[in-house]
Amino acid sequence: MENYNGNSDVEVGAAPFQAAFKTGIVLGLITVVAYFILYFIDSTLLASGYVGLVLVAVMVGVIMIFGIEYRKELGGYMTFGVAFQFVFIALLISSLISTGGNVLLFHIIDPNLPTVLADAQMESTLAIMERFGGAGAIGGEEIDKLREGFYDNYTIVGMIKSLGVSVIISAILALILGAILKKRDKSLDY
């Protein structure tokens, strides 16, 4: 059976995976390279929320560029389902690659990095609490639990948990970006 682009359903079904796989590899490599560059500049930048937001913005931009290019390859039109699959698979592949890069960075290249980042997050959290007048409300035991929680995020188990959360966030982002990338062929309306 052929669709309106003249491609068979099997080709169209496989095509989102192939295009998304390539996009996911590019996104994953961009993320890993960014982490390593930030590590060499100042490792505490890896614990910054602002850096995370910038990386998410870059990822959205790259996905939009590759998604629009993929839509052009399909003849200028793409259903929501295909757009969702494309974005979700790309983000999933990217998450797997970046998690692998983080394991390499945090546990092989610099095993002390999780402690440095947990301490940086702790300092940032305490500074925020101080600005809002709540720094004195937390005791030493709570601070130790908080620090341990930050450290746990950088363990392999913590990274696997983060990967699970990343899958959920990827699905939500795929819904949003899929809705933006889809384009209906209005000539098929009767």
Image (cartoon, rainbow, N blue to C red):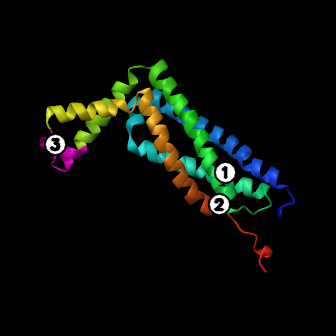
Tell me the chief SS of the magenta region: helix
In this rendering, the label closer to the viewer, 3 or 1: 1
SS at circle 2: helix
Q: Amino acid at mark 2?
A: Leu
Tell me, for residue 67, which label it has, or none: none
From this view, report whether residue 1 is shown above or below residue 95: below
N-term-proximal mark, 3 vs 1: 1
Name the spot of residue 109 as percent of width and height, x first: 48, 19
x and y, in percent, of residue 154 in the image: 40, 30
**Cα–Cα gap, marks 3 and 1:** 45 Å
- Residue bearing mark 3: 135
Q: Which residue is mark 2?
A: 181
Residue 146 shown in magenta: no
Which quarter of the image is occupied by the C terminus?
bottom right
- In this view, 69 is above or below 186: above
- Residue at 42%, 35% in the rendered image: 46
Range shown magenta: 128-138
Cα separation, mark 3 vs mark 2, equals: 45 Å
Q: Are marks 3 and 1 in contact (CB under 8 Å)?
A: no
> Image point 16% across, 42% down: which residue?
135
Q: Are marks 2 and 1 in contact (CB under 8 Å)?
A: yes
Side of 109 where 21 appears, left or right: right
Q: CA distance from mark 2 to mark 1?
A: 10 Å
Q: Regarding mark 1 in the picture, which secondary structure is present there?
A: helix
Residue at x 68%, y 50% (from the top left corner): 66
Q: Residue 137, how many percent across, how many down? A: 13, 43
Q: Which residue is mark 1?
A: 86
Mark 3 lies on a secondary structure that is helix
Three-letter amino acid code of the residue under disc 1: Phe
The crowd level at tag 1 (other Cα within 10 Å; few <14, some 14-19, many 20+) is: many
